[in-house]
Amino acid sequence: AIYSQNLAGKVFLYVYGNEFFEVSFPVDHFLHLTGVETRLSAKDFYKNAKRAILTNNQFYFDTRHPYANAKKKLPCLKRLPELTNDTVCILKDMRTLTIVYKLSVTNLEFTLGLTENTDDKGNKINDFFLPMSLRVEDSSVEKSNDGEVVDFIFSRDASVSRYETLLVKDESKNIPNCIKHLIKENFYDDSNG
């Protein structure tokens, strides 16, 4: 329910210095964050979880998805919106055993590993990043090459073209011109004179 109400169907713009990236939260990526395995499609798993009709025989644990990890992830899953509406750190090139996440977002308690939005053949669909892994460990920063504190986070409904809501703002920073084309004009009228 939290994923559905706060993340699904929305896009978030993370800005740090003169760099930025956009994150979308598709319903079929929810499963990646839970730490469980299932025979259901990712969309059916999400639908059943959202409707509170997911039964214990519709998911299971195995060596790649141990119960202990899923148990650690559950409280963080409920807190996922903190990564979109609180000050966070952007990590670059976070290494895990199996993958290097070009970008990740962390509040130093848990980390969301992001992947580029590509098709089955690896072709880029758009410039959005998608959630692929929820890490509940304090070593994500050490496993990254670089980190930056976010300056701004904007959000918009996926059905509109420009960001209309400012969720996080570093009061000491001005909105950089490099994102002007992505946000509503009123942010510039207000903040940059």
Image: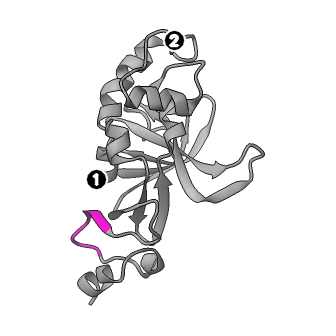
Residue 147 percent coordinates (x, y):
43, 52
> Mark 2 vs mark 1: which is more N-terminal?
2
What residue is disc 1 on? 85
Asked if 64 appears above or below 9 in the picture, the reply is: above
Q: Residue at x 44, y 12 (%)?
A: 67
Side of 28 relative to 82 (left or right): right
Q: Which residue is depicted at the point 74% across and 43% down?
A: 120
Q: Is residue 102 left or right of residue 108?
A: right
The answer to whether residue 25 is above or below residue 48 is below
Q: Is residue 47 above or below residue 120?
A: above
Residue 75 pos. (x, y %): 30, 27
Amino acid bearing label 1 = Asn
> CA separation, marks 2 and 1?
31 Å
5 inside magenta stretch: no
Q: Residue at x 44, y 37 (%)?
A: 140
Find disc 2 in the rendering and name its residue. 61
100 or 121: nearer the viewer: 121
Query: Circle 2 sits in a helix, a strand or a loop, which is it?
Result: loop
Residue beneath the point at 29% across and 37% down: 79
When asked about the image quadrant of residue 184, the answer is bottom left
Q: Quadrant of the C terminus?
A: bottom left
How busy is the neighbourhood of tag 2: few (under 14 within 10 Å), some, or many (20 plus)? Answer: some
Name the outermost residue toward the left: 171
- CB under 8 Å between callouts 2 and 1? no
Amino acid type at mark 2: Phe
Q: Position of residue 3 (x, y in %)?
A: 37, 40
Q: Secondary structure at mark 1?
A: helix
Q: Which residues are magenta?
A: 165-173
Total marks in image: 2
The reply to whether residue 129 is visible in this rendering is yes
For label 1, the crowd category at 10 Å Cα-Cα, with few meaning under 14, some 14 to 19 and many 20 or more, is some
Query: In this orientation, does residue 137 appear?
Result: no
